[in-house]
Image: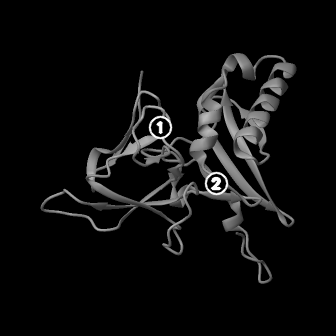
Amino acid sequence: MATDNYGLSEVIGPGVSGECLERKGLHINEDHFILEVVDPDTLQPVPPGEVGELVLTTLSKEAFPMVRYRTGDLTRILPGECPCGRTGRRMSRVLGRCDDMLIIRGVNVFPSQVETVLFEIEGTEPHYQIVVERKGAMDEATVLVEAAESIFFDQMRRQKEMVERIQKRLAQELGVTFEVKLVERKTLERFEGKARRVVDKRQLWSSPTAEPHA
């Protein structure tokens, strides 16, 4: 069984927190770290269970200690105790980066959440892009998904079924409705290094009377 472990090179490699075999969140190594979850804008602590930016202070790191280091990673403290019996605090898996978060119709959305849904649906390729636009007073998000050739060149009914299945899963998991469009393989632009998953066209549109979006 594979488990998730969290760390970062600036503080320490894998070792800040890690899952046990129950896989109910990452146990924090609180004898070595003070962990806080704060609002990225105000830097004030968020209530337990709410998503915020992870801030770390090292307790045992020598030579180069870190005090309230902003990781840029988004997570939350999980309530209750783990079924394994350990009573220390647990954090969720990292949900995304502060600069990756989108607000669509009042709902916080992370590309990693979209990716998780797509990877669970047979027939999709590991390449996608989220396009966000403002139409009137509302934000609209479209997910472009590269489909396997067997799907894309098959009958229209099969394509429609896949689009509806993706839309339903995204709405269930994220709480917001996406338009979904299937595109041919290698249609989406490739980038060296980190892929460009989001195209936010709201930032490209402006007018003297335009109101800033949330």
In which quadrant of the rendered view does residue 146 lie? top right
Q: What secondary structure is marked by label 1? A: loop
Q: Quadrant of the N terminus?
A: top left
Q: Position of residue 13 (x, y in %)?
A: 27, 45
Q: Position of residue 160 (x, y in %)?
A: 84, 27
Q: Amino acid at mark 2?
A: Val
Using the image as rendered, state which of residue 160 and residue 48 is in the foreground.
Answer: 48
Q: Residues within 10 Å of mark 2 (few under 14, many from 20)?
A: some
Residues at circles 1 and 2 in contact by the CB criterion of under 8 Å: no
Which residue is found at the position 48% from the left and 43% from the top? 93
Which residue is found at the position 64% from the left and 44% from the top? 129
Above or below — where is 207 with respect to 104? below
Of the residues under marks 1 and 2, which one precedes in the sequence? Answer: 1
Which residue is found at the position 77% from the left and 41% from the top? 171
Query: In this rendering, which labeled residue sits more in front, label 1 or label 2?
Result: 1
In which quadrant of the rendered view does residue 101 lie? bottom right
**Residue at image mark 1:** 82
